[in-house]
Each structure stands twice: as structure tokens, then as C-alpha cells.
Image (tube, grey):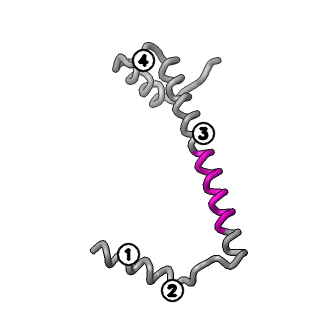
Amino acid sequence: MNIQLKAEYEQFIQNRIATGRYENAEDVIIKALTLLEEWEKGYQEWEEETQQKLAAGLASIEHGDMLDSQVVMARLEEKLSLKM
């Protein structure tokens, strides 16, 4: 596979090789792709957890399990005053 990179990316790769941590451009790119894969997996897990939390919250609202905004604000103010 041949890839055209912008000059700044080529320089970045060369700088990484110059540190001695990587032997060649392929090593740098493999590391970058591995990190991207890990990040995307983490993002996907976060997204799934967030969707589950939203679904649970919406279900609670539908069942009437919610607090009045004044109660929420009073509890927040109480917590903040205890920390000061």
C-alpha cells in the first residue's frame, strides 16, 4: 500500500524514528493505528454506556421517578455549602 502524507506528518514520523523508539515508518504507523483502535473501542464502550444510562433515565421519568428542580438545586446548594 502506498500512502501520500502531508510534509508535517512525514516529519513527525521521521522525528519519532530519530528518537530511537521506532526503527522505521511502518513501526510508527502501526503504533498510531493500534492507539486509534484502542481509542475507538473505548469511545464505543462509552457511547454504549451513555445510551444505557439515558434509557434508564428516560424509563425513570416515564415511571414518575424524578425530582423537582427546586429540590435538586437545594441539594446542590447544601452539598456546596458543606464543602466550604
Q: CA distance from mark 2 to mark 3?
A: 39 Å
Give the crowd class for mark 2: few <14, some 14-19, many >=20 residues within 10 Å: few
Residue 13 x/y as whole percent:
44, 24
Q: Which residue is mark 1?
A: 79
Task: Decide which of tag 4 and tag 3 comes sooner along the chain.
Answer: 4
Compared to residue 58, the image places residue 16 above or below, namely above
Cα separation between marks 2 and 4: 58 Å
Residue at mark 3: 41
In contact (CB < 8 Å): disc 2 and disc 4: no
Mark 2, secondary structure of its residue: helix
Numbered disc in front, either 1 or 2: 1
Label 3 and label 1: CA atoms lie apart by: 36 Å
Q: Rounded to the nearest whole Å, what is the CA distance between mark 1 and mark 4?
A: 51 Å
Hey, what amino acid is under mark 2? Gln
Q: CA distance from mark 4 to mark 3?
A: 25 Å
User: Which of pointers 1 and 4 lies earlier in the amino acid sequence?
Assistant: 4
Amino acid under disc 3: Lys
Q: Nearer the viewer, mark 2 or mark 3?
A: 2
The stretch in magenta equals 43-57
For label 4, the residue is 22
Residue position marked by numbered label 2 in the rendering: 70
The numbered mark, 2 or 3, whose residue comes first in the sequence reads: 3
Nearest the eye: 37 or 50: 50
Going from the N terminus, do you reach mark 2 or mark 4 first? 4
Q: Quadrant of the C terminus?
A: bottom left
